[in-house]
Image: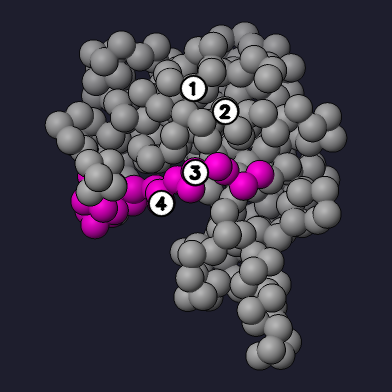
Amino acid sequence: MNEFVVVIPARYASTRLPGKALREIGGKPMLEHVFERGAESEATEVVVATDDERIADAAAAFGAVVCMTGNQHRSGTERIAEVADLLDWDDDRIVVNLQGDEPTMSAAVINECAALLADATADIATLASPLLTAEDFDNPNVVKVILDKQGHAIYFSRAAIPYPREDASRSVAIATALHHHGIYAYRCGVLRRLVAAEPSELELCEQLEQLRALSLGMTIAVGVPSTRPGPGVDTEADLQRAEREMQA
């Protein structure tokens, strides 16, 4: 596997769960669980990227390398791009974007995402799993992705894709769509090109950042993880669910 680093973008502000990066699961901040998963992976370095001193202090207390960034970023991707520039990483370095609200993303899954960039035709790598229920197909909070024969993303959507024109084809559509997981790997050069571009109309419409990459003609390799990660933490109920899953 090519060498890679993990960056965990973490912010304090959250509309639905303020301060969620520091909310505790099993007696430890959620961010510490995420950091441990990154440290258990094959990454050569794990960096917490934040603009908040409370998060920086907590991360330093559990031994993380912290990179302070500006507070102007609209996404974790933009924050990671600043880290790449601040730390002077070259364009060929592979970075895994491990989001700070994904405490159930295992080290093996992180490795699998990074390994997808062995595909020389891929600009970005990410992961997706089969839908768990038929209801997920229609749920706009479940982001779906459909792939070509090479395992590259054709499109991501909150809508039910592919759309079944007839009831008989609904089962085929549900089997074709995959549930996208919020983890990405990219080379720094691709990352810089991505954040330098303006949001595309598709991205603004669906509020899905990965559509900017597709609009730019980038190739996104999509793999199915060996172990399905749990959903990210956005609400109090999500936090409680994550604690139950991690204690099981």
Q: Which stretch appears magenta?
A: 223-243
Measured Cα–Cα span from mark 2 to mark 1? 6 Å
Q: What is the secondary structure assignment of the residue under circle 4?
A: loop
Q: Is residue 224 magenta?
A: yes
State left or right for residue 84 relative to residue 194. left
Name the residue that disc number 4 marks.
231
Question: How many neighbours does mark 2 have within 10 angstroms: few (below 14), some (14-19), or many (20 or more)?
Answer: many
Measured Cα–Cα span from mark 4 to mark 1: 19 Å
Is the residue under label 1 in contact with that under label 2 (CB below 8 Å)?
Answer: yes
189, 228: nearer the viewer: 228
Q: Which residue is mark 2?
A: 111
- Res. 10 image quadrant: top left
How far apart are the two marked residues, 4 and 2, measured between alpha carbons? 18 Å
> In the rendered image, which quarter contains the C terminus?
top left
| Of callouts 3 and 1, the N-terminal one | 1
Q: Which residue is mark 3?
A: 227
The image quarter containing residue 70 is top left
Q: Quadrant of the N terminus?
A: top right
Q: Depth-wise, is mark 3 or mark 2 nearer the camera?
A: 3
Residue 14, placed above or below residue 159? above
Q: Is residue 191 visible?
A: no
Left or right: 68, with 205 as reference point: left
The local secondary structure at tag 1 comes to: loop
